[in-house]
Amino acid sequence: MGTALKFVGALVLVAGLGLAVMIWRGSEPGGIDDLWHTVVGAPDLGPVAFEVLARRSRPNDALACPEGFCRNARPDIASPVFPVPAERLRELVAGVAREDPETQIVYSARFEDQDRYVARTRIMRFPDTINVLIIPISADASTLALYSRSQIGYSDWGVNRKRLERWLERIAQRTGRQA
């Protein structure tokens, strides 16, 4: 075996071990989260305006919206009306998000009805941003718009849609609404 080939093999081994250590460290300083932040930027992709939202051309997002609310984007899921006030719905969404593994809130304003979460995949810890907008219907009813999108990769293999379906099902269970 040539010296150059041994050198390349050693480099690949060291790089592989370095990546393994970063994955093992996860969110700790020096972990894979730091690598993603350095390579692709902050994990929070920021706010969206649901009323004028334009969907991505890549299949790595999912949208749940009440009928006619997201005028420029076709939702994957029609958001139901829940028999709870908007403030209570926001609390329920926060509870459901906290139950999802590796999901944390990154933005919440007291007087706004929009929150933002970042969820990470289990092993490689790829970040997804989930935007939530609570929409009051009446004193005793509300709905919501949800947009989940991946920061890294062309396709998400349906992960974002499954997340929104899971969140909506859990919210429906907590409100007594049939999913």
Image (cartoon, rainbow, N blue to C red):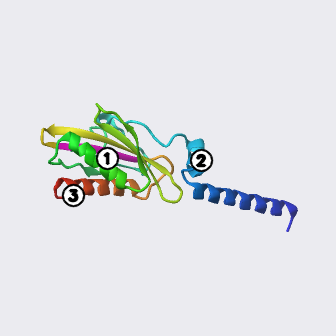
Tell me which residue sits at (47%, 56%) in the image: 121
Task: Tell me: 119 left or right of 172.
Answer: right
The magenta stretch is: 142-149
Tell me which residue sits at (55%, 49%) in the image: 33
Q: Residues within 10 Å of mark 1 (few under 14, many from 20)?
A: some
Q: Residues within 10 Å of mark 3 (few under 14, many from 20)?
A: few
Q: Position of residue 153 (x, y in %)?
A: 51, 51
Task: Tell me: 154 left or right of 49.
Answer: right
Reply above or below: 172 against 136.
below
Task: Compare residues 10 and 174 and report the one nearer the observer.
Answer: 174
* Residue annotated with mark 3: 173
Task: Tell me: 65 left or right of 11.
Answer: left
* Residue annotated with mark 2: 29
Q: Whole-Å distance between the Cαs marked 2 and 1?
A: 27 Å
Q: Position of residue 130 (x, y in %)?
A: 38, 45
* Residue annotated with mark 1: 94
